[in-house]
Amino acid sequence: MAQNIYDQDDFFAGYSALRRSREGLAGAPEWPSLRAMLPPMAGRRVADLGCGFGWFCRVAAEAGAASVLGIDLSEKMLAKAREAGGNIVYERADLETLVLPEAAFDVVYSSLAVHYVADFSRLARMVAVSLAPGGRFVFSMEHPLYTAPTAPGWIEREGRRVWPLDAYLAEGERRTDWLAKGVIKYHRGIGTVVSALLAAGFALTHLVEWGPDAAQIAAHPEWAAELDRPPFLLVGAARTFR
């Protein structure tokens, strides 16, 4: 079973205070780029893996999705999502072992969840089977430049501020302290992610190493630091097999 860090009181309190937790998709700077990867929601069957507080679920439902399923491992997150209402089904499940019905969805979405999954290849295969032909899998993850280090943040090296990289090509489990001690994430390179999608029967439609644009930096000058290394990898893929 995956580590259920979000149900720990200290982590949940810290996560709830984040801008993206308080403001939803409006507080997620990468959302406009993700939105551009998605097809129109009207009439589509949608699943959100790692739905958290249900922000995307509600956006999809309000945009006319035929059905919306939100899945998360955290009881605390699901409770907050259900409080917000909406014509949405929420279920508790572990993405490590999740099985979705065959050809049951037109869009599967996931925001910043897949780096908590040890076996991404299995997840990609399962999502592919769950999509109708031509269905879309759109997701974001922490960029591998972020998951490689074993300690968060900049370090000083020879008088310069640098972003540390620890054994970038040695993929696998990483333990870091982020909002709580001992948070488990899984580091994998871009090539590994793309290869898993292709092997599962997807065609890549988008691959974005996200960073803020000029307008975002003008509004939030502190985000200029993100130009030194992209914080997120955004991926769009379409199911190609029948």
Image (cartoon, rainbow, N blue to C red):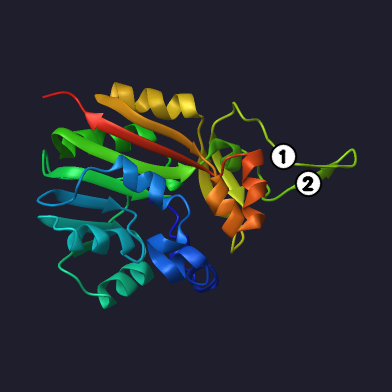
Q: In the rendering, at what x and y percent does residue 83 appear?
A: 28, 77
Q: Residue at x 90, y 38 (%)?
A: 158
Q: Are marks 1 and 2 in contact (CB under 8 Å)?
A: yes
Q: Nearer the viewer, residue 99 or 21?
A: 21
Q: Nearer the viewer, residue 191 or 39?
A: 39
Q: Residue at x 48, y 29 (%)?
A: 190
> Is 101 located above or below residue 9 in the figure?
above
> Is 55 located above or below residue 113 in the figure?
below
Crowd class of label 1 (few under 14; some 14 to 19; many from 20; radius 10 Å):
some
Find disc 1 in the rendering and name its residue: 164
Q: In the rendering, at what x and y percent does residue 3 appear?
A: 45, 55
Q: Residue at x 66, y 44 (%)?
A: 150
Find disc 2 in the rendering and name its residue: 155
Q: In the rendering, at what x and y percent does residue 159 appear?
A: 90, 42
Residue sitting farthest toward the right: 159
Distance Cα–Cα, label 1 vs label 2 = 7 Å
Q: Residue at x 39, y 50 (%)?
A: 32
Q: In the rendered structure, which amino acid carries the disc numbered 2?
A: Ile
Q: Which mark is residue 56?
A: none
Q: Which of the 4 quarters of the picture holds residue 122?
A: top left
